[in-house]
Image: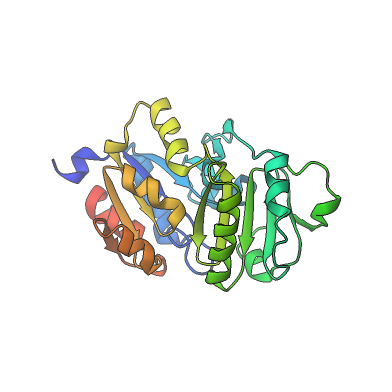
Amino acid sequence: MHIKEKIKVVISDLDGTLLNTHHQISEYTKTVFQKLHEENYLIIVATGRHHLDAFPIVESLGCPVYLVTSNGARIHSPSKELLFSFNMKSDAIKSVLALDIDSDITTVLFREEFSQTNKENKKLNSFQTKMNYPTEIVDFDAIEDLSAIKLFFSHDDHDKLVALRERILVNHPDEFSHAFSLPFCLEFMDKSVDKSVAILKVLEKENFTFAESISFGDGFNDEKMLNSTGKALIMENAVEALKNKLSHIEVISTNDNDAVAKYLTKTLLS
């Protein structure tokens, strides 16, 4: 069956995928997604970003979008109705932060209305083109309730984050799901949380299947999503380790080259 006849759902990551290196969606990509909506494709955006951060981005597409955020811990309808939410427990987060984490590593808790961090990180702040999701610098030891949507670590040295991941998993082998959304971003969620799990909830609500879906991604937090859909594409700008691990999946051009929109135009809209 031709892909145009098979696909009814378009699923895309944001950073490194729909967004260019300036963290924006091009006018061309917006036009393509508006045409997809006009032709009755269901559109799902699945990102590691917090929903307050992602809302203005998906609104700029100019068409209705289901939004999966924090790697699957939140699902919002096109009207911004909260359909699903799941938090990490405070005690679980406390046990991770008790591991004496190197102070050079930026630690961030994704809360509902704001984030909390141990230090300012201008590189992370640059990802917000609109400051919808404020951040406060705190002493985590002084906070009693640390329950959060997601626990996030950042450092320019990827190997340092890999070492931290191994330390956490040794102490918590079955408690969390985790992923590198970018080489300098390590994210921990509750073990039940994954983009693919949340996307399935949306598909079931709309009476579609993964087999009728096409997905685009560039990070390890996209891995299960990419492996689940009937057609999947990896961005050329994705890390080599992901492209090697998912060598059976086609690689398209870069996020700066509007690769997602160009591929959808060629395969679904032409």
Q: What is the basis of the colouring in this image?
A: rainbow
Identify the residue at horizontal 47%, vertical 66% (top origin): 20
Quarter assignment of residue 249: bottom left
Q: Residue 206 vs residue 266: left or right?
A: right
Q: Residue 38 vs residue 56: left or right?
A: left
Q: Quadrant of the N terminus?
A: top left
Q: Position of residue 45 (x, y in %)?
A: 46, 46
Would you place residue 226 above or below residue 89 in this image? below
Would you place residue 188 above or below residue 89 in this image? below
Front-lying residue, 257 or 26:
257
Q: Position of residue 259 (x, y in %)?
A: 34, 62
Q: Position of residue 51 (x, y in %)?
A: 60, 45
Front-lying residue, 184 or 260:
184
Would you place residue 187 above or below residue 3 in this image? below
Identify the residue at horizontal 51%, vertical 50% (top origin): 47
Q: Position of residue 256 (x, y in %)?
A: 41, 69
Front-lying residue, 229 or 178:
178
Q: State the residue lying farthest toward the right.
A: 142
Identify the residue at horizontal 68%, vertical 70% (top origin): 122
- Residue 19 seen in render: yes
Would you place residue 39 above or below residue 154 in this image? above
